[in-house]
């Protein structure tokens, strides 16, 4: 899998997401599902570090993400 998710610390307080070429958005989506499962498997707060350095650039259509209507925390609070 070109996007790998691993515990970066023995005490499971930091996850590392490694992107290696070639990867696509489906790979990223799958990795984010794994991140969610790993975060839900422990009671403590966990830092998530994404390492895109081995990858030269993200795939095309980088701006494909749109917030859901219920994601109010993303709205501009300046009015």
Image (spheres, rainbow, N blue to C red):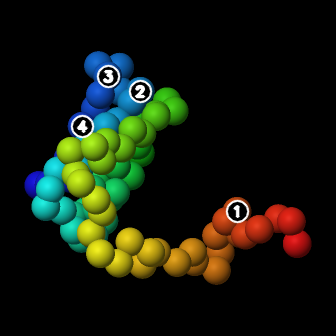
Label 3 and label 4: CA atoms lie apart by 9 Å
Label 1 secondary element: helix
Label 4 and label 1: CA atoms lie apart by 28 Å
Label 4 secondary element: strand
Q: Residues within 10 Å of mark 2 (few under 14, many from 20)?
A: some
- State the residue position of label 2: 13
Sequence-earlier tag: 3 or 1 = 3
Label 3 and label 1: CA atoms lie apart by 30 Å
**Where residue 54 sits in the image (x, y, percent)?**
21, 45
Residue plotted at (57% across, 77% down): 68
Label 2 secondary element: loop
For the residues bearing labels 4 and 2, Cβ distance under 8 angstroms:
no
Label 4 and label 2: CA atoms lie apart by 11 Å
Q: Quadrant of residue 32?
A: bottom left
- State the residue position of label 4: 6
Label 3 secondary element: loop
Q: Is residue 40 above or below residue 21?
A: above
Along the viewing direction, whichever of 69 and 56 lies nearer the viewer = 56
For the residues bearing labels 3 and 4, Cβ distance under 8 angstroms:
no
Can residue 41 be seen in the rendering of this structure?
no
Q: Residue 73 carries which label?
A: 1
**Where residue 39 sits in the image (x, y, percent)?**
40, 43
- State the residue position of label 3: 9
Q: Is residue 57 above or below residue 20?
A: below
For the residues bearing labels 2 and 3, Cβ distance under 8 angstroms:
yes
Q: Residues within 10 Å of mark 4 (few under 14, many from 20)?
A: some
Sequence-earlier tag: 2 or 1 = 2
Q: How crowded is mark 1: few (under 14 residues within 10 Å), some or many (20 or more)?
A: few
Classify residue 67 as left or right of residue 77: left
């Amino acid at each position: 899998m070109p996007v790998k998710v691993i515990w970066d610390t023995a005490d499971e307080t930091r996850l590392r997401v490694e992107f290696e070429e070639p990867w696509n958005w489906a790979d990223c989506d799958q990795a984010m599902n794994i991140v969610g499962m790993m975060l839900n498997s422990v009671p403590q707060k966990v830092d998530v570090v994404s390492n895109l350095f081995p990858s030269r650039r993200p795939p095309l259509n980088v701006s494909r993400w749109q917030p859901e209507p219920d994601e109010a925390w993303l709205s501009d609070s300046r009015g």
